[in-house]
Image (cartoon, rainbow, N blue to C red):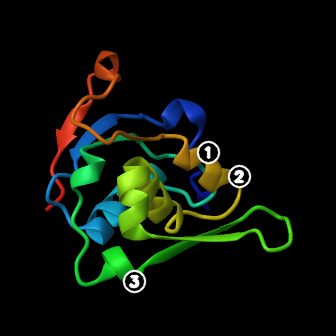
Amino acid sequence: MTSTFSPKPADIDRRWYVVDADGVTFGRLCTQVARLLTGKGKPIYAPHVDTGDFVIVVNAEKIVMTGNKELDKVYYRHSTYPGGLKAETAGNLRKRRPHRLIEKGVWGMLPKNRLGRRQLKKLKVYAGPEHRHTAQKPEPLSVA
């Protein structure tokens, strides 16, 4: 009788990928990034272990949102004080903090626990074309 394989920290090979978001649809980019962060494409994937890779997203301000999502998609946050509910459309959030738009989209596809928070820390998003992770030698990845 064989036992179930559970990946150990020595078994996990973490890679770095850089994704250019220029002209890419918002939802398609977020699903691909979430899949890389969780490690679901790897043969050693286990749902309770962080086996994912690091992902760098550049040109976050040039992402494409189809339909009327720029105006209709609303992000809410609350200050925990009475009357402290703030609402912001996706278009305003893109103008103010374009990296936050992708972070929120990817976070919606990750587990809402310690594992998901650890996986989200491996996501690096930049509004422009430059990033500061050249020492890690990231591999370019195309998301079509």
- Disc 2 from disc 3: Cα separation: 31 Å
Using the rendered view, name the quadrant where residue 105 is placed. Answer: bottom left
Q: How many marks?
A: 3
Circle 2 residues within 10 Å: few <14, some 14–19, many ≥20:
few
**79 up-or-down from 13: above or below:** below
Quadrant that contains the C terminus: bottom left
Q: Secondary structure at mark 2?
A: helix
Front disc: 3 or 1: 3
What label sits on residue 118 in the rendered view? 1
12 displayed left or right of 16: right
Residue topped by disc 3: 72
User: Given the image, on which type of amino acid does mark 2 rest?
Assistant: Arg
Q: Nearer the viewer, residue 61 or 121?
A: 61
Q: Say which residue label 2 marks.
A: 114
Q: Are marks 2 and 1 in contact (CB under 8 Å)?
A: yes
Q: Position of residue 47 (x, y in %)?
A: 57, 61
Q: Classify residue 2 as left or right of residue 134.
A: right
